[in-house]
Amino acid sequence: MAKSSLLSLLSLLAAVTTLAIAAAASSSSSSNFIKSSCSTTTYPSLCYKSLSNYASTIQQDPHQLVQTALSFSLNKTVETRAFVSKLRSISGLKPRELAALRDCIEEMADSVDRLGRSLKELKLCQPKSQDFSWHMSNVETWVSSALTDESTCSDGFAGKALNGKIKASIRARMVNVAHVTSNALSLINKYASDNY
Ligand SMILES: *[C@@H]1O[C@H](CO)[C@@H](O)[C@H](O)[C@H]1NC(C)=O
């Protein structure tokens, strides 16, 4: 009796260990997949830092990878737009500063809109499906315009329009979101060319 329950305990332990090893191996191969995919982007370490949290969703699925990268970029852009919108209420802004902010808020809104549409369109981009290249080229065009909007916004804060702390904090965020979107675009372009 005692001996058989010891045996079943041991085999249970063995099974649990095997599962743990398998889970660790699968998460590490997903991490490797994300790392090697990110290595072709312009900002590979930002790419890996952004996407490695989603390793269990991404697994080693190229479609899931681009879907997650685009969704991450959309979410960051929504966040940044909200941040920039709030800055409007800062008192004592010069007209020039307000104008730069207004332009930026508008560009971020356009960017959110394009990225949101792209994310829906990307769901239709299943390899070997009909119209793959049509949907894919829409995604590439819209994400690329979204990136232009974001870069225009951060360039607006590069000059003398805003001073000091506000400028530094806006610019850092704008640059970050533009890099995240640029990475999503590289992954999308790579995915497209791998599947044409
Ligand atoms: C982006 O936000 C949506 C809605 O809140 C959420 O469902 C999705 O998982 C988020 N995407 C990422 C990559 O975090």
Image (spheres, rainbow, N blue to C red):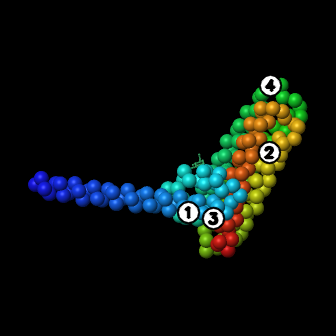
Residue found 68% across the figure and 44% down from its top: 78
Q: Give the mark nearest the N terminus, 1 or 3.
A: 1
Picture disc at residue 33? 1
- Sequence-wise, which precedes: disc 2 or disc 4? 4
Q: Is residue 138 above or below residue 179?
A: below
Give the residue pinned by disc 4: 91
Look at 61% across and 71% down and name the residue there.
127
Residue ranking furthest to the top: 91
Q: Are marks 4 and 3 in contact (CB under 8 Å)?
A: no
**Circle 2 residue:** 154
Q: Upstream in the sequence, badge 4 or badge 3? A: 4
The disc, 1 or 2, on the residue closer to the chain's N-terminal end is 1
Report the front residue among 76 and 24.
Answer: 24
Q: Amino acid at mark 1?
A: Phe
Answer above or below: position of 87 versus 39: above
Residue 17 at x, y = what percent?
Answer: 33, 57
